[in-house]
Amino acid sequence: MIIVLKNGVDKTQIDNLVNWVKSQGLSAHLSEGQFRTVLGLIGDVSNVDIDLIKGLSIVETVTRVSEPYKNANRKFHPDDSIIEIGDVKIGGGNFAFIAGPCSVESEEQICSIAGEVKAAGANLLRGGAFKPRTSPYDFQGLRGDGIELLLEAKELTGLPIVTEIMDLSHLPLFDDVDVIQVGARNMQNMELLKALGKTRKPVLLKRGLSNTLKELLMSAEYIMAGGNGRVILCERGIRTFETATRNTLDISAVPALRELTHLPIIVDPSHAAGISRFVKTLSYTAAAAGADGVMIEVHNDPQKALCDGAQSLTPEEFAVTVRGVNRIREAAKEN
C-alpha cells in the first residue's frame, strides 16, 4: 500500500502516522522526494482500513500495490536512487564505467590494467577473484589472494573495487571490497542474498541467464528486505536460441526496469556479446537506452588471458569506447 502525503505536512504528523503504521504490525518505508512524500506500507495490509487513512488530513491519495516487490518498487520511491561508492555515484543521472579483467591473474597484471583503465575514464575497477566456470578444469581464480591483489590495485589507483562472491562462507574475505557482485548463477541464491541484506555494502546484482525482470527485482527485494538498499541491477544478456553471440543482450530491460524500479541499472556488454568487437557498439546502445553505467572487461593481453579473453577489450579500445559513450550521453541530454 502506498500513501502519498500532501505538500507541507508537519514532520510530527508524519511521525505519528509512521508510528500508527508500525503499531499495525507493518513496516513503513518513507521516501521524501523533491515534489512529494511517499509512505510505503510493507506487510499484510489486507486488514488495513483504506478509507480511514484516506480520511486523514495529511493524506492526498492511497493506493494498493499488487507487485510483490515493495522496497525495489518505483511506486514506493518515485525518485531515482543514487548509490554512492566513495566519491563515485551511480544512478540519478550519474554514469559509471566499471572496467577490468575477467579474472585477477597477477599483481603486475591487475595493477597495470587498473592504471590504464583509470586513465581512460573508469570509475571503478572490476576483477574476478573467485571465478564460476562451466568446466571444473578451467581456471577458478586466485580466491582470497585475488582480493588482496585487487586491494593493492585500489591503493595504487584509488579506484573502488568490484568483485564477485561465490559462496556465503566467503563473505568475511569481502570486508574491504567496495562493491560485492552477485553473478548470474547466484541471482536466486536466497541465503546469500539475505546475508548481503545484513551488510551495508553496495551489491551489484546480475540478472540470471533465464530469469525474468520480475525475478530479478524479487532477488533485489531479498537484499533490500534485510535493510540494505544499496543495490545496483545489471543486465548481462540472457540465454536465447541465438548462437551468433554468447548471450542475447536484452536492451529493452533498461527502459522496462526504469519504469518498475528506482534502483540504478547498468549493462555488461562483455558477457552479453562474448565477442570483443561487439562490445563498443553494445556499450553505445546501453548509453542510448538510458543505462546508469557499463561494466566492461579489459585485459592488456587478451590472447593470453586465463579467462574470457575473447570478450575483453584492450585498454586502448576501452578508451575509445569511453569517449564514444560520453558523446552519446551528451547527445541524449540534448533530446
Image: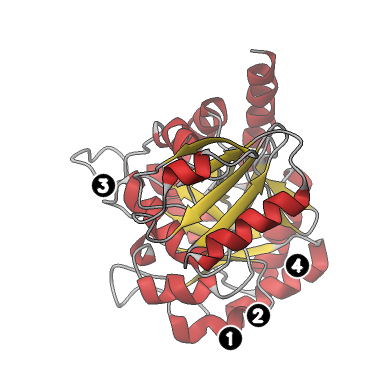
127 shown above or below 325: below
Answer whether labels 2 and 1 touch (C-beta < 8 Å).
Answer: yes
Helix, strand or loop at label 4? It is helix
Front label number (2 vs 4): 2
Taking the spot 49% from the left edge, 77% from the top edge, the residue there is: 195
Helix, strand or loop at label 1? It is helix
Q: How far apart are the two marked residues, 2 and 1, measured between alpha carbons?
A: 6 Å
Please say which color scheme the image uses. Answer: secondary structure
Is 286 on the left or on the right of 201, as rendered? left
Taking the spot 26% from the left edge, 47% from the top edge, the residue there is: 239
Q: Nearer the viewer, residue 187 or 318?
A: 187
Which of the two labelled residues, at mark 1 and mark 4, occupies the earlier sequence position? 4
Which of the two labelled residues, at mark 2 and mark 4, occupies the earlier sequence position? 4
Is 193 on the left or on the right of 96, as rendered? left
Per the image, the residue denoted by label 3 is: 239
Is 57 on the left or on the right of 246, as rendered? right
| Residue type indicated by callout 2 | Asp
276 shown above or below 166: above
Front label number (1 vs 3): 1
